[in-house]
Image: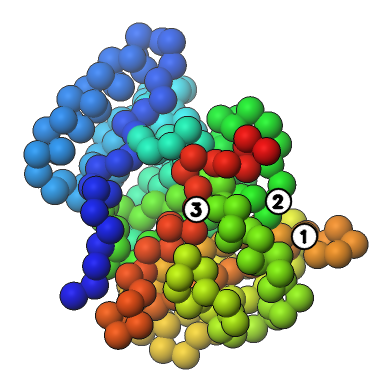
């Protein structure tokens, strides 16, 4: 049985709150729901926060509370929200405003699917605001856990700082990472990952979900077993890009599909 790291049920913040009365009221209701959910493994809390609170508040009151941001320019079915996670000073979650269970959802591989990773990269500004400083491109990471290593059944991409040791390892390996998926020669947090390079300052037109499904044999048929992590990078000469990391949850190899472990929710990089 795949190990799911303990203590990860319901760690997602029910809002950062604004000074307006409506925001404070929404936050209070959410935290009451949090207390009740803590007594049972409620896997739909994130969905209810976004669907029942953030989206209606944005539509009716022009405030995303208890989320930090709600984007509905193309409608609810293609929108997303950004929510402060309950853990760490700097961690945020990018969450679709439609029902999408997780990395295994087939709609993520449709040709016109919203690029949630691109939106998550843009949401890094919230991490930097919390950190109180600009962070190096290769200090920011986006992570989605496998279906076997998550506590919530609404897709959510963790947006936060990268662990310093992981950043250092990837800097050392950067020259060996190409535009095709291949095993890294070093372990990250004690586990094996596949890696590939993506060029460009943003992820527009380059969806990591689809790159994983198309580039790793067998991945399309079992996306739910994969964890996917995206890290900013800058090549010599200043060319921006990304490193994509993927691993399949497998009891035989000991990988639990919890890519979030590569992140640093204490954000030591903000202290340096």
Q: What label sits on residue 263 in the rendered view?
A: 3
Tell me where residue 126 sits by quadrant.
Answer: top right
Q: Residue furthest right?
A: 237
Distance from the alpha carbon under mark 3 to that under mark 2: 14 Å
Q: Position of residue 135 (x, y in %)?
A: 68, 42
> Of the residues under marks 3 and 2, which one precedes in the sequence?
2
Residue at position x 40%, y 20% from top? Answer: 17
> Of the residues under marks 3 and 1, which one precedes in the sequence?
1
Front residue of 19 and 269:
269
Q: Between tags 3 and 1, which lies in front?
A: 3
Distance from the alpha carbon under mark 2 to that under mark 1: 7 Å
Q: Which residue is under mark 1? A: 234
Quarter of the picture containing the C terminus is top right
Q: Position of residue 179 (x, y in %)?
A: 69, 80
Q: Is residue 119 visible?
A: no
Circle 2 — which element? Answer: helix
Q: Is residue 9 above or below residue 174?
A: above
Residue at position x 36%, y 35% from top? Answer: 86
Q: Residue furthest bottom?
A: 217
| For residue 260, side relative to residue 164 (left or right) | left
């Amino acid at each position: 049985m795949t190990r799911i790291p303990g203590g990860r049920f319901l760690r997602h913040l029910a809002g950062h709150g604004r000074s307006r009365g409506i925001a404070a009221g929404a936050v209070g209701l959410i935290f009451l729901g949090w207390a009740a959910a803590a007594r049972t493994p409620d896997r739909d809390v994130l969905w209810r926060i976004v669907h029942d609170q953030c989206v209606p508040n944005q539509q009716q009151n022009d405030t995303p509370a208890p989320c930090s941001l709600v984007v509905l320019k193309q409608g609810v079915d293609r929108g997303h929200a950004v929510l402060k996670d309950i853990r760490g000073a700097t961690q945020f979650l990018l969450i679709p405003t439609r029902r999408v269970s997780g990395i295994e959802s087939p709609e993520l591989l449709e040709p016109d699917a919203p690029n949630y990773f691109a939106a998550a990269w843009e949401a890094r500004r919230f991490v930097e605001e919390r950190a109180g400083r600009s962070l190096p491109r290769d200090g920011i990471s986006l992570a989605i856990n496998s279906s076997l290593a998550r506590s919530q059944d609404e897709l959510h991409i963790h947006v936060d700082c990268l662990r310093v040791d992981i950043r250092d390892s990837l800097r050392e390996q950067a020259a060996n990472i190409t535009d095709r998926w291949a095993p890294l020669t070093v372990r990250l947090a004690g586990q094996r990952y596949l890696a590939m390079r993506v060029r460009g300052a943003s992820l527009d037109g380059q969806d990591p979900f689809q790159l994983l499904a198309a580039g790793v044999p067998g991945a399309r048929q079992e996306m739910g077993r994969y964890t996917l992590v995206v890290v900013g990078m800058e090549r010599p000469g200043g060319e921006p890009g990304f490193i994509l990391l993927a691993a399949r949850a497998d009891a035989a190899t000991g990988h639990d599909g919890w890519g979030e472990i590569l992140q640093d929710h204490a954000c030591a990089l903000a202290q340096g």
